[in-house]
Structures are given as C-alpha cells and as structure tokens.
Amino acid sequence: MLFYGPPGTGKTTTALAIAYQLYGPELYKSRVLELNASDERGINVVRTKIKDFAAVAVGTARKGGYPCPPYKIIILDEADSMTEDAQNALRRTMETYSKVTRFFFICNYISRIIEPLASRCAKFRFKPLSEEVMSNRILHICNEEGVSLDAQALATLSSISNGDLRRAITYLQSAARLFGSSISSTDLISVSGAIPEDVVKSLLASCKSGEFDVANKEVNNIIADGYPVSQLISQFLDVIVHADDIPDEQKARICKKLGEADKCLVDGADEYLQLLDVASETIRALFDMPQTLVF
C-alpha cells in the first residue's frame, strides 16, 4: 500500500493502527518492521536489513483473538526521502517475498516515488483535514486536558494549522504551557509564528494607495518587526485570492509574482528586496500598469 498526502493527516497512524489490529501487542514487534527518515535506508539497508526481515516466513497461529495473517509488514515512513537506487532495489524484494511480506510506503510527495514502485501498490491519498474534523478533535483534547478554548480561538487554530492536526496539537500544547489553561486567539498566533492579519491587510492597503513611498514604508516596518517574508507571502496569497474587489487578471499577475518571490527566497534572496518587488508588482497590477518599465 502507498499512503501519500500532506503531513499531519494520519498516514503513519493509520498504518500502525492496521498493523496493531492485525497482530495485537504480542506479535507486533516480531511481525512489523518500521523504518523512518531517521534510520539509514540506503541501498545497503534494502539488501540486508529489509531483505533479511522479508525473507523469513511466519506461521498462522492466532493470539488474543487477532487475525494474525501469515505474512509480515514492513512500514517505510517518509519513503520519498529514499534514494532512487534504494527504491529500485526494493522492486525485486517486493516481488520475491510477496507471499510472506507486505509493504506500507508512506510519503508526502508521490512524485518522488519511482513509477515502477508506485505501480506495484494500492494508492491512498490523505487530504488535509477539514475544519469540522479538526475542531472536533481539538475540543476533545481540550476537554481531556482541562484547557479552555473559545470559538474564535478554535477557528484561528484550525486556520493556522492548514489541515495539519499534528501542528494544531503542537500549537495548543505550546500555548497551554506559556499562557495557562485559558487560551485566546492572540496567544495561538503568537506561538505559531503566523503574521497578524492586520499586518497583511496593511500591506495590501498600502499597495492599493498606488504610492510607492507608502508601500516601501510598510515593507520597511514588516522587515523591522522581524516577520518572516516567506510566511507573509503565503498569507498575502490567501488575502489576494479571496479579495472580492480585485479582478481575476490582476490576481493572476500578483500570484505569479508571489510564486517567483517565494522561489527566490528559497534560493537565498534578500527578504527586503523580494517583498518590495512583490509590493511594486502588486501596485502595477492593481493600477493596470505595464509589467515591464520602459525607459
């Protein structure tokens, strides 16, 4: 099986739950081999550790009422970080020992799994958790831990987590340690590293003014406050996409520039220059100025 999708959506938990349901606590350690990114998983490990584990047949004796099928399970978490040579070496191992061993591949990016390996698996895509699912689980945790969370704080937590339940739990845990059992929306934003919404809207308002000096001043304020520009670009994108007063063509121009700026930041470009470039292009897009300046 191949489980893929964004982090924090339950891929590894699902695989482990299936393994425990099949073998129970007694046989789990002898029937299941779990390897993740912290383990060495190069081609030598595939040829030795994984192959040796897969080659040994097991019986069908049931224990504790669990099914205990006559095969073992190898769980390869974060399989997209495996080298291509290691993935190619697995192809033969999977075919040779298919009667006695089953494989779980877990990854965030299915495109990094070679096609010959992916084609041998049943694929299951895990999508980001919906706000309703996130809220229900967070409220359950809050009730069990004695933490108070109002409706606005709950909505904020769901928003800044982007469907990642593990991230939401981490934010909630950090906020509870810092601010006590009563947590507000502001507390969650401060521990998450998210940029306050009014800062993002102020940048857009300065661009709508059409004056470069106003936008430049706002950019300087953002840099001086130490906000990460990559995070700001992500939140600025959401504001632009959901803005009702900006035509689609202008949105497309702005989003294109945001993508270019994000790539430049990944490559190590200066944050101030990239944010100023984004602000400048946003002004040009909003006022239908030509994309390239003519001297």
Image (tube, helix red, strand yellow):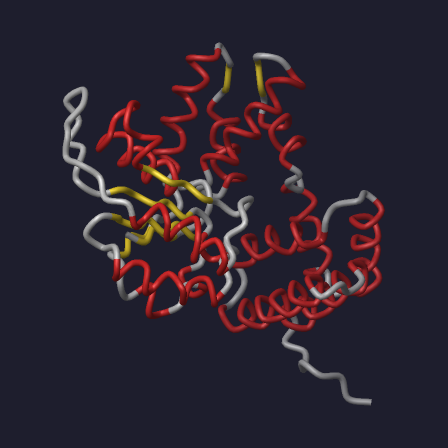
Instruction: Write the residue at 24% across / 30% down.
Output: 23
Q: Position of residue 244 (x, y in %)?
A: 49, 57
Q: Is residue 116 above or below residue 150?
A: below
Instruction: Write the residue at 55% across / 25% down.
Output: 172
Residue extending farthest to the top is 146
Q: Position of residue 55 (x, y in %)?
A: 30, 50
Quarter location, residue 199: top right
| Side of 134 relative to 71 (left or right) | right
Quadrant occupied by the C terminus: bottom right
Q: Position of residue 166 (x, y in %)?
A: 48, 34
Q: Is residue 53 above or below residue 288?
A: above
Quarter location, residue 215: bottom right
Q: Is residue 37 above or below residue 267?
A: above
Q: Is residue 91 above or below residue 132?
A: below
Number of numbered discs on residues = 0
The front one of 140 and 51 is 51
In this rendering, does residue 1 appear at all? Answer: yes
